[in-house]
Every structure is written in C-alpha cells, then in structure tokens.
C-alpha cells in the first residue's frame, strides 16, 4: 500500500478537498481508490467542452493534474509535506462529446523529492481518450 497512513483515502474527503477550487468548477468527483491507484470522473458538458462541442484538451489535463496531485498528496505526511505539479504532458487520442470521462492515476515512481504519476482517461465505454504523465515536486510545508 502506498498511502501515507496505511489506509486507503476516503473518497468523500478527496472530492471535498477540491470543493472550492477548479475541480468543483469542472464537476470532478473522486469515485474509487485502491492500494496503489485513485479514480475520478468528470462530466463532458458545457463546462468542459471546447467551442466545437468536444471535450477540451485543457479540461483533460486539469482532470489529470487534479487526480495525480491528489494521489501524491495522499502519499506524503501532510503535516510535513505538500506535492505540487512540476511538469505534465498529455496525448489526446479520442474525442468525447457527452457523458463522463474516468481518470485512473497510478504512481510510476515515489521518490523523496519527486513523484511521477501516469493517468489514463477513458470514456464510458472504456476506450482510451487521453494518457498523461505528471511529475510532482514534494516540498516541505513551510516552503509552500
């Protein structure tokens, strides 16, 4: 198990942490969590569309960074460290016009000062929409 306190994080808490910031504006909700992964969903609607009615690539990246950053935050001692995005990339592979997309984040490397997370975003049929990699910096709380 990768989680800091040895327990799988509470899904309600993960969603609540973003309730006054971008995740709430985009409708991102955490839906499941396992021993080494976390899953969230985001609606494909007027909030997340680009002007031509498809899922905006930037919304996919926001979903990827949200879920990867939250995963990273749940791995470190919150009294001592925070995780912040250092670099993110994404390949947008398939359009989505409506419904929900689901992102699953898993760590590739959990180092002392950096984490690397892979995030797969799929549509409701399980088809790959976007694949992203997020690098997080682990910094002391007093430096944030």
Image (cartoon, grey):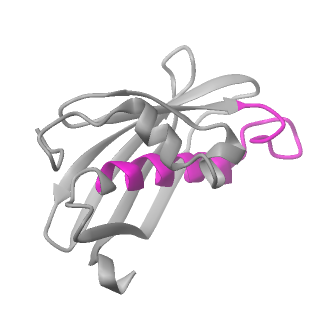
Is 123 one of the magenta-colored residues? no
User: Would you place residue 137 above or below residue 14 in this image?
Assistant: below
Judging depth in this view, the residue of 94 and 8 nearest the camera is 8
Q: In the image, is residue 47 part of the stretch drawn in magenta? A: yes
Q: Is residue 103 visible?
A: no
In the picture as drawn, the residue positioned furthest to the front comes out as: 79
Question: Is residue 17 in sight in this rendering?
Answer: yes
Count of marks overlaid on the render: 0
Residue furthest out toward the top: 125
Q: Which quadrant of the structure image shows residue 2?
A: top left
Q: Locate the N terminus by quadrant.
A: top left
Residue 94 to residue 77: above or below: above
Pick out the residue farthest to the right. Answer: 51
- Image coordinates of residue 4 in percent, x first then y, are 16, 50
89 or 84: nearer the viewer: 84
Q: Is residue 41 left or right of residue 3?
A: right
Q: Is residue 141 above or below residue 34?
A: below
User: On the rendered structure, is 18 left or right of 54?
Assistant: left
At horizontal 48% and vertical 54% (from top left) the residue drawn is 65
Q: Residue 47 in the image: x percent, y percent?
A: 79, 41
Res. 24 image quadrant: top right
The stretch of residues the image draws in magenta is 44-72
The structure residue drawn at horizontal position 29% and vertical position 37%, both measured from the top left corner, is 9
Residue 105 appears at what percent x and percent y? Answer: 35, 41
Residue drawn at the location 34% of the way across and 66% of the way down: 83
Residue in view at x 40 percent, y 44 percent: 119
The C terminus sits in image quarter: bottom left
Return the x and y of residue 70 as percentages of the image width and height: 39, 51
User: Could you tell whether 20 is left or right of 75 in the image?
Assistant: right
Q: Nearer the viewer, residue 82 or 137?
A: 82
């Amino acid at each position: 198990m990768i989680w800091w306190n040895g327990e799988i994080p509470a899904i309600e808490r993960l969603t609540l942490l973003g309730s006054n910031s971008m995740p709430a504006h985009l409708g991102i909700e955490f839906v499941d969590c396992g021993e080494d992964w976390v899953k969230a969903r985001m609606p494909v609607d007027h909030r997340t569309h680009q002007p031509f009615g498809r899922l905006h690539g930037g919304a996919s990246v926001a979903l990827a960074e949200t879920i990867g950053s939250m995963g990273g935050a749940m791995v470190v001692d919150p009294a001592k460290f925070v995780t912040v995005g250092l670099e993110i990339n994404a390949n947008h592979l398939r359009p989505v016009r409506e419904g929900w997309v689901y992102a699953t984040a898993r760590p590739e490397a959990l180092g002392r000062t950096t984490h690397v997370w892979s995030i797969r975003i799929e549509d409701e049929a399980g088809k790959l929409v976007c694949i992203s990699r997020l690098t997080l910096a682990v910094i002391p709380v007093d430096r944030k």
